[in-house]
Amino acid sequence: MLTTAHIDRVVAAALAEDAPWGDATGEAFLPADAHAAAQLTAREAGVLAGIDVVRAAFRLTDTSVQVTAHAADGDSFTAGQVLAEIEGPARAVLQAERIALNFAQRMSGIATLTRAFVDAVAGTGARITDTRKTTPGLRAFERHAVRCGGGVNHRFSLSDGVMAKDNHLAVLRSQGLDLTEAIRAARERLGHMTRLEVEVDRIDQIEPVLAGGVDVIMLDNFSLADLERGVEIVGGRAIVEASGNVTLETVGDIAHTGVDVISSGALTHSVRSLDLGLDATVSAAR
């Protein structure tokens, strides 16, 4: 999903936004032949994501900048650990610094939070997944970070799977259509490789949805007791996904109800960027 071409396209746009006519400060204060050596250092513990994005930020600014990684995406690190070393023309290193950090801090924040969710459900068999509640234009970056933290990805876009949510079902009801028959008709129109998921918010919707032949049923905003009851009713006839009000404090209890998947928008829409720093030393030309 996070290809080199996609990384370059997004990072190039970020660099152009940050320095559309060059770096006025660097050009005014730094000699053109000055050299910089910098360390990407963790100021708190976490999980790394985005090292290839860091490389791209410096490479696209100046191909002579060298980035040596000391950790890989998905690696845990401690406060004070050096994650990468950067060397090259001082103007280029300092110009790319903020963009490299912005991406690495946000992506590592997502990976770190995801790892905490994954650890909280360890031993239950439940998988942690993200949602489409991502930053516009940065979905591939944020979804990659979720995987670095040990989570899995939901459908990438509206084009990648059929997922009927509450508003879709409301339209069906307004048209007087039977839910089970509507699901069966949708199934007939789909190719054999396309999964079909339907969201329900009440226990009494489960059987009509299952009768339609879904692959996944989402139990949205169910209480713990209703989740347990829902899993019992489904009885292995479909994958059971729990969603709604999923937090780090509640995810463990949700997992113990027996659901197969737990989706949380908080992994991407409410994450705190991790504190990473780039400490540079500028010297005369080499």
Image (tube, grey):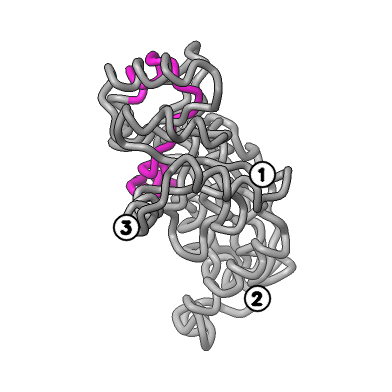
- Separation (CA) of disc 2 from disc 3: 70 Å
| Viewer-closest of 119 and 252 | 252
Q: Residues within 10 Å of mark 2 (few under 14, many from 20)?
A: some
Q: Position of residue 255 (x, y in %)?
A: 40, 19
Give the SS element for disc 3.
helix
> Would you say residue 263 sits in the magenta stretch?
yes
Q: Residues within 10 Å of mark 1 (few under 14, many from 20)?
A: some
Which residue position holds label 2? 33
Which disc, if any, is residue 69? 1
Q: Which residues are magenta?
A: 251-277
Q: Do tag 2 and tag 3 residues touch (Cβ < 8 Å)?
A: no
Using the image, determine if residue 103 lies above or below residue 188: below
| Viewer-closest of 38 and 71 | 71
Q: Position of residue 97 (x, y in %)?
A: 51, 62
- Residue for point 65% across, 57% down: 55
Give the SS element for disc 2.
loop
Q: N-terminal of the two: label 1 or label 2?
A: 2
- Between label 1 and label 2, give the one nearer the viewer: 1
